Amino acid sequence: MGRVVALLLLAFVVGRILALLEQPILRREPVVRPFRRATVLTAVTESPVAERVVFWDFDGTLARRDGLFAGALIDALRQVDASIAVDREDVRPHLRSGFPWHTPDVTTSPLAPQEWWERLRPVFERAYRACGVGDGVAVAAASASGVATQFYRRDAWELIDGAADALDLVRYAGYANVILSNHGPELPALIDDLGLHVDLTITSAAVGIEKPNPALFRYALEAADAGSDTWMIGDNPIADVQGAEALGIRALLADGAYPDSRGVTILEAARIVAASG
């Protein structure tokens, strides 16, 4: 009796296996989510396809503004009173604190552009007053319409040699280009104005987190659907290189635009990435 039951059970199992083999195999097609040029993704949808991504810093890596914020403060001051004899070297020492990237461990909620600039207004006013600028002029020049407008003027910026070619090179190698920068809220518009073709722009002002805080890199990895084949290229050895490597992201110091460079040019960095694939 036991042998009969065993044979019946074996026949049942064999029958089920044959039935399953006759069914068509269902294959899930990969879903590729197109990249969008955006400042912040309020919701990130998981995708079964991981992207090959290169994160790029902006200031000093792809583009530069003469004098950066010190230059913008002087430009704004000239708009209010061109007779005041203050230059960017006078202002620069007073801008070494107060910006959100000076305290990357401190995070905030995402801010609207006007709110972001309003938080910096006391920093600008303090710098002006330290240089002997009167209160009325300091307040007027430090307004968002003053410094912000001057900082993001298209004609105040220039691309670093090789920037467009570097982006094209890694794109042709199959990577998505994502800008990840400690910057103000108007950065995406500036990138468009400069003619840089990128897939996504993540600016710290819109996220409320600054490099090298690991939380910003985690956010960027998720927003870009980045897989294991991911790189960070930037000119800051701490914010860009150490910050990325702490999350297991391969990083290259691309400070070749500086006279005291310790790294490579952006075009050399792009070649290294392209060759790795």
Image: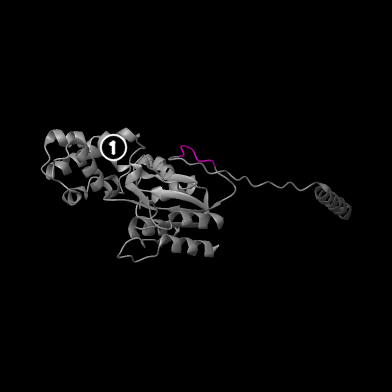
To which quarter of the image does residue 240 belong? Answer: bottom left
Q: Residue furthest front?
A: 83
In depth, the one of 167 and 205 nearer the eye is: 167
Decide whether residue 42 is among the magenta residues: yes
Question: Is 96 located above or below residue 43 in the figure?
Answer: below
Q: Secondary structure at mark 1?
A: helix
Per the image, the residue denoted by label 1 is: 117
Q: Position of residue 1 (x, y in %)?
A: 89, 52
Say left or right for 32 vs 9. left
In depth, the one of 200 and 215 nearer the eye is: 200
In depth, the one of 46 and 252 nearer the eye is: 252
Q: Position of residue 131 (x, y in %)?
A: 12, 45
What is the span of residues highlighted in magenta in the rendered image? 41-45
- Number of marks in picture: 1
Q: Position of residue 57 (x, y in %)?
A: 39, 52
Q: Amino acid at mark 1?
A: Trp
In depth, the one of 24 and 184 nearer the eye is: 184
Predominant SS along the magenta part: loop
Q: Please give the name of the residue rendered at 24% of the width and 34% of the height, measured from the top-left corner.
A: 143
Say left or right for 21 vs 108. right
Q: Position of residue 251 (x, y in %)?
A: 43, 60
- Judge whether residue 76 can be spotted in this image: yes
Decide whether residue 251 is among the magenta residues: no
To which quarter of the image does residue 74 belong? Answer: top left
Q: Please give the name of the residue rendered at 85% of the width and 49% of the height, measured from the top-left corner.
A: 15
Question: Is 6 located above or below residue 262 in the figure?
Answer: above
